Image: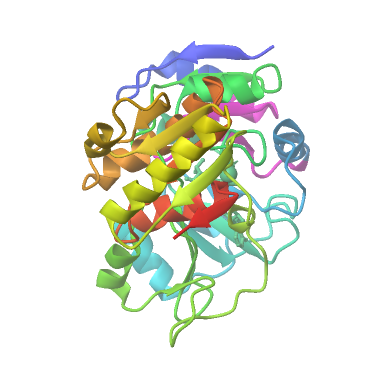
Amino acid sequence: MTRVLLVHPQFPQPEIIAQAAAEIQRGGLVAFPTETVYGLGANALDAAAVARIFEAKGRPADDPLIVHLASADDLPQVTRSLPSIALELARSFWPGALTLILPRGAAVSLSVTAGLETTAVRVPAHPVALALLRAAGVPIAAPSANRFGRASPTTAQHVLSDLGGRIDLLLDGGPATIGVESTVLDVTRTPPVILRPGGVAREVLEALIGAVALRGEAGPVSAPTPQISPGLLDKHYAPRAELILCASPTPASTLEKMGQLARKFLEEGKKVGLLIADQDRQFFAGLPALIFPLGPADDLAQVARNLFAGMRKLDEQGAEVILARGFGRQGLGLAIDDRLRRAASRVVE
Ligand code: TXA
Ligand code: MG
C-alpha cells in the first residue's frame, strides 16, 4: 500500500512533512517532488533502505544514486574532499538543478554509489524537498521515481502509475517546474565534464567557470569518463511506443519529414502520436494522429516541462509510433535533445 499525502508546493505543511520524515528515518521509501522531476527517496546512510530503492525501481545495482542535502553546509557528511570549483558552483547554483560528482565520504554507503569512490550530490530547490531533508535530518538518496528505463515522472500521477504499491509514501506537491533532471557535472576532472545535460544549461555553467566538456563530445575539451551513467545508456527515458526523433537541419525540413513519416505509418494502419511545437499544429491539421504540443518552439523551459508528460500521455492514448521534432541544442535544448535521443529507436536527420 502506498499512502498519498497532498502537500502545499510552496508552503509545505509541517505535520505532513513530519510524517514523511518519520518514514525516511524508519528506513521507508518516500517519493517527493523536486523542481526537476519526482524523486524516490531513502536514508542515504542506511544500506537496507537504499537497497529497497533499487528493488522498487527494478534498477540494476551498478547504477549509482544522487545524494540530496538540505544545504551545502552538510557536504562534509558525504564527501571527503571538496575541489574549490565545487564550492564556487554550489554557491552559485544550489539550491538548484545541478548535481556535482565528488569524492565519496565514508558515511555514504557503497550501495548508493554502486561501488564507486565518487558520489553524486545535489541540494534541490523545491520547498517540499528541502523541508523533507531538514526534517529527516539525514542525506536522502533519490533517483527519479520511475520504473527503470521509463520516462521520469513530473507529476504524482506518473509516480503512482509506475510505483504504486511498491513504495511507502508519496508526497503529491503538484507538477515539477523544470521537467528534466538535473545536470550531472563531474568536478573531479579538469575541465569538469557534463555526464548528463539537464536543468542548468552548459552555457550558464561556462559563464561562471569557463570551458566545460560534454561526455561523448569530440574536441579539445573532451575528456574520457571511466564509468557508465545509467542516464547515459543508449536506450532510456523511453515510452512504450517506438519513438522516432526528426531532427533535420531546419524546422521546415523537419516538419516535411515528420509529415511524410506520419502519412506512411497511418497508411500502414498504425496509431501515430506527434510530439510537436505549438506552432506546428497548423501543419498537421487534418491528419488523424494523436497530437501533444509541447509549447512554443522558442520557449524551451515550457517544452522541457512538458516533455516526459507528453511521452507518457501518447503512450496512454495507445500510440504505436511517436514522431518527435527536435528543438536544437542551445540552452535547455541540449537536455531536451539528449532525452529525445535516448527515448528514440532511431533519429532521422
Ligand atoms: O534531477 C535529478 O537529478 C533527479 C531528482 C530526483 O533529483 N534525480 C535523478 O536521479 O535524475 P537518477 O538516479 O535518475 O539519475 C542519476 C544520474 C545517473 O545518470 C547516474 O549515473 C548519475 O546521476 N550518477 C550518480 N552517481 C554518480 C557517480 N558517482 N558518478 C557518475 N555518475 C553518477
Ligand atoms: Mg532516472
In the rendered picture of this protein, how many numbered marks are placed on residues?
A: 0
Residue 266 part of the magenta segment:
no
In-image side of 245 versus 298 (left or right): right
Seen at 61% across and 59% down, the residue is 119
Q: Nearer the viewer, residue 216 or 132?
A: 216
In-image side of 145 versus 50 (left or right): left
Percent x, y for residue 76?
53, 59
Q: Is residue 302 above or below residue 163?
A: below
Q: Nearer the viewer, residue 295 or 285?
A: 285
Regarding residue 122, the answer to whether it shows in the image is no
Seen at 45% across and 38% down, the residue is 262
In-image side of 18 versus 107 (left or right): left
Percent x, y for residue 138?
57, 40
Residue 36 part of the magenta segment:
yes
Q: What span is colored magenta in the figure?
A: 22-47
Q: Is residue 161 above or below residue 87?
A: above
Seen at 49% across and 22% down, the residue is 156
Regarding residue 79, the answer to whether it shows in the image is yes
Instruction: Name, please, the residue furthest toward the front.
Output: 267
Q: How is the image coloured?
A: rainbow
Percent x, y for residue 68?
52, 45
The image quadrant where one finds the C terminus is bottom left
Q: Is residue 205 above or below residue 11?
A: below
Percent x, y for residue 260?
42, 44
Give residue 310's quadrant in the image: top left
In-image side of 248 versus 233 (left or right): left
